[in-house]
Image (tube, rainbow, N blue to C red):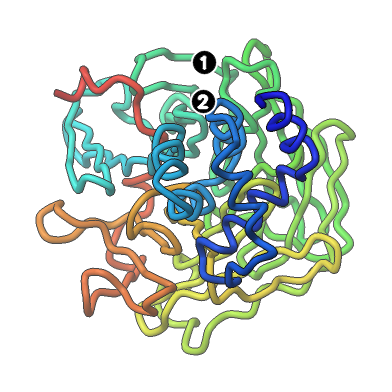
Amino acid sequence: MAGRKRRRLRSIDISRLVERALENAGGLVAVDESESSLQQARSELPTDILEIIIGHLNLRDNIRASAVCKRWRSVALSVRVANKPPWLMFLPKFGDLVEFYDPSLRKTYSVELPELRSSRLCYTKDGWLLLYKPRTQRVLFFNPYSRQLINLPKLELTYQIVAFSAAPTSPKCIVFTVKHISPTVVAISTCHPGATEWTTENYQNRLPFVSSIWNKLVFCNGLFYCLSLTGWLGVYNPEEHSWVVRVVPPPRCPENFFVKNWWKGKFMAEHNGDIYVIYTCSTANPVIYKLDQVNRVWEGMQSLSGLTLFASFLSSQARTDILGVMRNSIYFSKVRFYGRRCISYSLAHDRYYPRKQCYDWGEQDPFESIWIEPPEDLSAFV
């Protein structure tokens, strides 16, 4: 009997089984006699195989799978994994007490970090901060949870931005910065942990490219993408040591975008090989674009399809598989109501939260906060 069941299961396309089950759970198709074999197979599918299959689903499909039947719900809940949102880190203007805000719990933690004294935030990735000390021109990595410091060679950073490709403990870590010598010439400096000096090379531009602290920088698919103040996209390949300003028409700004401090309301993030740009100002709802790498155009987005963007001036992040109402929203690096709530914008509801709030970079020092990976251990924050 058991052998006949196993043979019957082998004759069924498992991926199709799950696909049809999810369609039924979402109310996309009606179950008729042709579905009876699939229903029988679902009930006979061994639990260990079902756990493997559902364990490979994303959060959205996991939730849909839990609606198939009681057995599938039990399995889906047992293997469900949800992402944690990043925390918002605030540097004090005076003193060493640094605050970390968890948007999922609306809770603020404080910890003394004297290592950040006289430092300027530059970038964050994988729980590491890249810092710059203007007085000494020191560039260094700092992990606020482990307190580990990794020094880099000195470099004068004036009006250019900096980013890195991976945690400094990784052999793939590259630090990158670009500044213009003239509208058609840029100087690119790179470094890595353990190096004794920065490597700087000049590159010609086919299109004008001006560096600014208001430019945006991300690392995606092995390349550094730099969005200039005027919307031109520069791309640096660290393996080939090549630089090009791509012929990609700049993203279209929303109406009334060019108001006071307009250059501050622009953000860029990457996720799974995709690059997103967000424009916002106090008089317009946020506008989101995704880069079409094939056709080299910016496509407007009306929905994030469950993605959540966390926007801040220095570096922005994106997450999928976040539980609750945080999906399909943009969270800005600003907290209201005595630190109890982060300003967000829901694309599903086309409105800001809290109600009647909006986000204006002109009200805030953009260097005072940054989104960072949450710690694994909360003991230092209790």
- Callout 1 amino acid: Asn
Instruction: Say if 24 sits above or below 160 in the image.
Output: below
Can see residue 187?
no
Q: Circle 1 is placed at which residue position?
A: 151
- Label 2's element? strand
Badge 1 density bin: few <14, some 14–19, many ≥20, Cα 10 Å? some
Query: Which label was assigned to residue 139?
Result: 2
- Label 1's element? strand
Q: Can you give x and y, in whole percent of width and height, for residue 259 in the image?
A: 43, 82
Question: What is the quadrant of residue 240 in the picture?
Answer: top right
Q: Can you give x and y, in whole percent of width and height, for residue 267 in the image?
A: 52, 60
- Callout 2 amino acid: Val
Choose the circle earlier in sequence order: 2 or 1: 2
Instruction: Say if 71 sits above or below 129 in the image.
Output: below
Q: Is residue 254 left or right of residue 249?
A: left
Instruction: Say if 196 sits above or below 134 in the image.
Output: above
Are circles 2 and 1 on residues that touch, CB within 8 Å?
A: yes
Residue appearing at x 64%, y 10% in the figure: 194
